[in-house]
Amino acid sequence: MKKTTKKISTAKAPSAPKSATKAPAKKMTAPAKRKPAVTSEPPATFISAKIDIGFGNHLYIRGTGPGLNWAHGLAMDCVGANLWTSTVKHATAPVTFKLLVNDLSWSTGNDFVVEPGQSVTVVPGF
């Protein structure tokens, strides 16, 4: 018998570039539950007035801001002796206002201004 001599190469096959190598397989997991989108509202703006306007009278607020206008007033809530309150919701800009007795008599002085989401207590003069 004839012996054949073949050269056996011991060189390694060229490897693929690192960017082309396969990433290890990831485990399959259930998709994460998404929280429902929450629409954030601006915080409410609180306005209080300390004044005694006499029995049978009511305090009103007029101005610029959500729910307010200069043409007619919104009745404020009497929450205690000489204390009236009003809440302006959804304000995104400063709220400018004046107070009126029985929606007829304007308070004296400059307009009052409160930043959205803040609380203010005023002492109006008439």
Image (cartoon, helix red, strand yellow):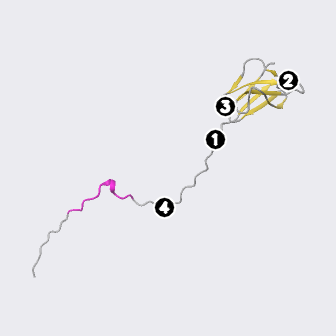
For marks 3 and 1, the one nearer the N-term is 1
Tell me, yes or no, whether the highlighted magenta stretch contains residue 22: yes
Q: Closer to us: mark 4 or mark 3?
A: 3
Give the amino acid type for the residue marked by disc 2 in the picture. Answer: Ile
Q: Are marks 2 and 3 in contact (CB under 8 Å)?
A: no
For marks 4 and 2, the one nearer the N-term is 4
Q: What secondary structure do most residues of the magenta stretch adopt?
A: loop
Q: Where residue 12 appears, x then y in whole percent?
A: 23, 62
Tell me: 43 left or right of 86: left
Q: Which residue is mark 4?
A: 28
Q: In percent of the image, x 67 and y 31: which residue is there?
A: 116
The part of the chain drawn in magenta is: 11-23
Q: Is residue 20 above or below residue 65?
A: below
Q: Which residue is mark 3?
A: 116
Residue 29 numbered tag: none
Q: CA distance from mark 4 to mark 3?
A: 48 Å
